[in-house]
């Protein structure tokens, strides 16, 4: 018995690789779809790029984006890039820190 336990300890626990972003996204989509189905809801249409940018600024920074930034985004609309830029901005950290410190 003791030897079997030592062998297990030497082997260590199996390391499971972290799921890919695509796998995580697929699982989130699956969970959302099943919740919508249970609650008899249908998702909204995909927003336009301008609506998406405005929503991200409001949700993440708590403000409406300046026209210059919307124009720049609409010239090369990359939603993931915009989201990353907003999440990495000092303004995001400040907005959420203020929210939690109130």
Image (tube, helix red, strand yellow):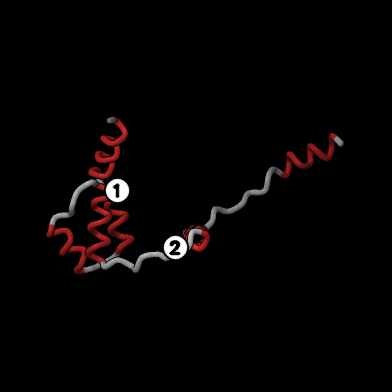
* Residue 75 position by quadrant: bottom left
Give coordinates of residue 84: x percent, y percent: 32, 54
Say if 53 sits above or below 48 in the image: above
Instruction: Residue 19: give x, y in percent of width and height.
Output: 54, 56
* Total marks in image: 2
Q: Residue at (52%, 60%) from the top-left corner?
A: 38
Q: CA distance from mark 1 to mark 2?
A: 33 Å
Q: Depth check: 56 or 79 in front?
A: 56
**Which residue occupies 25% across, 40% down?**
95
**How busy is the neighbourhood of tag 2: few (under 14 within 10 Å), some, or many (20 plus)?**
few
Q: Secondary structure at mark 2?
A: loop
Q: From this view, report whether residue 24 is shown above or below residue 4.
A: below
Q: Which residue is label 1 attached to?
A: 88
The label on residue 67 is none
Residue assigned mark 2: 41
Q: Quadrant of the C terminus?
A: top left
Please, is residue 21 above or below residue 91 in the view? below
Task: Specify whether 64 is left or right of 28.
Answer: left
In this rendering, the label closer to the viewer, 1 or 2: 2
For label 1, the crowd category at 10 Å Cα-Cα, with few meaning under 14, some 14 to 19 and many 20 or more, is: few
Viewer-side residue, 8 vs 45: 45
Q: Nearer the N terminus, badge 1 or badge 2? A: 2
The quarter of the picture where the N terminus appears is top right
Would residue 82 be found to the left or right of residue 23 on screen?
left
């Amino acid at each position: 018995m003791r030897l079997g336990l030592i062998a297990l300890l030497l082997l260590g626990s199996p390391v499971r690789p972290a799921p890919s972003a695509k796998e995580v996204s697929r699982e989130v989509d699956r969970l959302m779809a099943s919740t919508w189905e249970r609650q008899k809801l249908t998702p909204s249409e995909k927003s336009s790029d301008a609506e998406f940018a405005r929503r991200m600024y409001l949700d993440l920074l708590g403000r409406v984006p300046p026209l210059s930034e919307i124009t720049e985004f609409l010239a090369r609309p990359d939603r993931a890039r915009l989201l990353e830029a907003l999440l990495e901005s000092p303004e995001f950290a400040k907005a959420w820190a203020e929210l939690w410190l109130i």
